[in-house]
Image (spheres, rainbow, N blue to C red):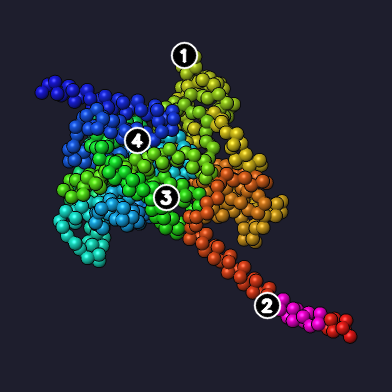
Amino acid sequence: MEHAIYLVTLVGAALVVAAAFSSLIAFRFGAPLLLLFLCIGLATGTDGLGIQFDNARLAYFAGSLALAVILFDSGFGTPLNALRQAAGPALSLATIGVLLTTGLFGVVAYYLLDLSWLESFLLGAAVASTDAAAVFFLLRAGEINLRERVRSTLEVESGTNDPIAIFLTISLVEIIAANASPQARVLVTDLVLGFLLNMGLGAIVGIFGGLAIVRLVDRLNLDHGLLPIFVLTLSLMVFAAAGAIGGSGFLAVYIAGLIAGNSDIRAVTILKRFQDGMSWLAQIIMFLVLGLFATPSQFPAILLPAVLLGLFLIFVARPIAVWLCLMPFRLPRPEVAFVSWVGLRGAVSILLAITPLLGGLENGRLIFNTAFIVVLVSLVIQGWTVGPLARRLGLIVPARLGPLDKVELELPGSAHHELLAYRVAPGSPVARGERIPRWARPSLVLRDGRSMRFQDMGRLAAGDHVYIFVPDRYPALLDKLFASRAVVDPEDADFFGAFAVDPARSAAELEAAYAPGLTEEERKLTVGDLVTERLGGHAEYADRVLIGPIELIVRDVDDKGKITGLGLSLEPTAPVARVPVFLSAGEIADRVAGFVRNWRKRIKKQSAEAPDDAERSPQPVVERATDEG
């Protein structure tokens, strides 16, 4: 017995270490890291090194707890401004998008596999949601500097669509396991009512649970080493409590993380670091367990239809669902195309594919194996191409800041102030003599191993370490002062235009200088307001607006979203590939209105030219008659 404990511990720890080392490969060669985790699990499983693991209940239990940890961390790290910006598109994708994907995929699965209609839709529900772990890794750890709107939409969608897919999958498993054949109307009604109850209870528990976490952390004077474990345990209690009363535990834990992360919770820096590490561990464990549970020797029997289903999901089902969901929102076509491509499937789909086995369904293993292959196809094709496609579509923007060396230190007894330690980077504004704002209070400077008061140091030099007390709202502004110049790629040298434009200047001056064809109302605006209006009321860093012969590029915005810097290009070269599909409702309306206007102009022109033609038409006859005479 004792020997077995040591052996299991050794093997388990070795797998986690191997997965951690594989991250070096992923970062070095751009490989999808989560695919490597799955492959390690497959290589050590039944058909690899021979580790026997076929306990579906244990796999589902471990995967569910790991997913709860990941979702809490996802909510904790999602700022409210990102949620507000992406709430409409993301929630549309997380609800209607999941249903559309389930339906489209289920229809094709019915004809490619030996499954009933309900089983086909069950398989579609299992693979309908994007994987939060895969999306967060590719966007955050992959160092892909995307436009903020696109990043927020993908992250919020991946964090909120899991509860819907989980509810739909479990409901279909229960119906099939009961050998029920409900009418379509009854089935839809039951699913809708069950969904509202499940999501409603989950949301309520999540809100109260998040508020309780914040209150307990602030009230209890726990040791800093115990505090992160206490918060993690409370999040799992929220997850379990919501599930115990029939709600969505996954939605509850995500909302609890969202509330806790956007409040003035104590020791937020310590909590973020701990949860980041726990999220990594949860991802590794979840993918390794699911990889161990799979049996690759069973894959060849269904390999061809499963691969075809994976390709259909990537190239047809997901794009159609995304286009229909995002049609009401006036998003540029490149952004819609990118969102449709970054619909990575991962551990959640494999986890949901275990539920048919737990329900004792006859085709449970077939559904699981098919979903596993679909996930592998998604990670291989989409995981390798996210970065290149973002560059192709012009969604990657130059970095705002160069290298920055900053450490956040927790201040006991104050949730509204921070102590930041900066290392002065060569070429940074403070190294060039820029003054530190009055609201920041430098307290200590370390230079060449000596500590001195800031007032005694004079001008800061590269390599100095500066300790500054600041209000919690302003650290982002200090980052600009202490960061070095961003290294601009040669391809991005002209990204922001050759000329700078003051956003406060009148748009009428722009019309006088370049004649871009502004309306009378637009000439009364400032240039910054003009750009904001053309962008639909919200501007963000690196947005571009083409106005006649010129192009205006947003160089910077403040914390309130107001444009503070603009560039102007006389030779518009926006690095955006044309996408022939994914028209939004606004673009469709514009094209229809343009077609109607052109049609009316042609009608008026034809009616205006008709009398002249009638008057001119007899003349040649008269001339010919005269010639004949």
Q: Which mark is residue 607?
A: 2
Quarter location, residue 487: top right
Asked if the residues shown at circle 1 and circle 2 are in contact, with their CB atoms under 8 angstroms apart, the answer is no
Query: At x 10% / y 23%, what residue is drawn?
Result: 1
Q: Is residue 63 above or below residue 316?
A: above
Amino acid residing under circle 2: Ser
Tag nearer the camera, 1 or 2: 2
Q: CA distance from mark 4 to mark 2?
A: 66 Å
Residue 278 in view of the camera: no
Q: CA distance from mark 3 to mark 4?
A: 21 Å
Q: Earlier in the sequence, mark 3 or mark 4?
A: 4
Label 1 crowding class (10 Å Cα cut-off): few <14, some 14-19, many 20+? few
Amino acid residing under circle 4: Leu
Q: Which mark is residue 315?
A: 3
Q: Main secondary structure of the magenta part?
A: helix
Query: At x 70% / y 51%, what residue is drawn?
Result: 514
Question: From this viewpoint, which residue is outermost toward the top?
Answer: 449
Q: Is residue 499 above or below residue 579?
A: above
Amino acid residing under circle 1: Gly
Q: Which residue is mark 1?
A: 449
Pick the front one: 345 or 249: 345
Q: Find numbered disc 4 in the image and state the secondary structure of the residue it sits on.
A: helix
Q: Is residue 348 above or below residue 283?
A: below
Q: Which mark is residue 34?
A: 4
Q: Which mark is residue 401?
A: none
**Residue 538 place in picture, x, y as percent:** 50, 51
Q: Earlier in the sequence, mark 1 or mark 3?
A: 3
**Start-end of magenta stretch:** 609-621
Q: CA distance from mark 2 to mark 3?
A: 48 Å
